Image (spheres, rainbow, N blue to C red):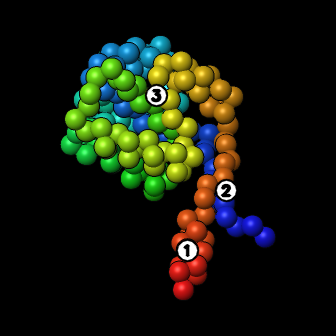
Amino acid sequence: MNNEYIPFTIGKQKRIALIAHDGKKQDLIDWCDKNKEILQKHFLCGTGTTARLIAECTGLPVKGYNSGPLGGDQQIGAKIVEGGIDLVVFFSDPLEAQPHDPDVKALLRIAQVYDIPMANNKSTADFIITSSYMNTEYVHEVLNFKQNIENRVKSMK
């Protein structure tokens, strides 16, 4: 039996993290407002100012974490590791240098490690939010980290 991967289920109600760099906050607010009917069926959270602005401008309830540069990206990453985030919508600004770029890269990496869908721009977010998977459970396979560690330890003996 191959136990290298284990199944994880993303529930029907998604737990969605909403993040945007300063130059993309208005784009994310507009996207959330346009997709309000869909988003209101899911649990929303986000980093600092972005979460507050989305809540104020759209009326959607959004649980706020710290601002990205103050650890919010790491908080979202930790929630992914704990199984508390199913989808990340992160409107990043590729034309502006970000002082907390290492934090952003760590968040992108952890989303990849845990096979979490992530949209980095509007068109990808549009594809994801209109997918039939938004209305159903989705089972995906994630690396069995416990087994992976056991195998690594055995190989070092």
Q: Report which residue position mark 2 lands on.
A: 7
Mark 3, secondary structure of its residue: loop
- Of badges 3 and 1, the one in the foreground is 1
* Residue nearer the viewer, 124 or 87: 124
**Whole-Å distance between the Cαs marked 3 and 1?**
33 Å
- The spot of residue 92 in percent (x, y) is 37, 26
- Name the foreground residue: 84 vs 69: 69
Position of 154 relative to 66 (above/below)? below
Instruction: Farthest residue to the bottom: give it.
Output: 157
Q: Position of residue 3 (x, y in %)?
A: 70, 67
Q: Are marks 1 and 2 in contact (CB under 8 Å)?
A: no
Report the side of 5 relative to 28 (left or right). Answer: right
**Mark 1 surroundings within 10 Å by alpha-carbon count, few (fewer than 14), some (14 through 19), many (20 or more):** few
Residue located 42% across and 36% down the image: 17
Q: Which mark is residue 152?
A: 1
CA gap between label 2 and label 3 equals 25 Å
Q: Secondary structure at mark 1?
A: helix
Q: Tell which circle, 3 or 1, labels the residue nearer the N-terminal end.
A: 3
Q: Amino acid at mark 3?
A: Asn
Question: Can I make out residue 61 in this image?
Answer: no
Name the residue tied to disc 3: 120
**Which image quadrant: the N terminus?**
bottom right
Residue 73, located in which quarter of the rendered image? top left
| Callout 2 amino acid | Pro
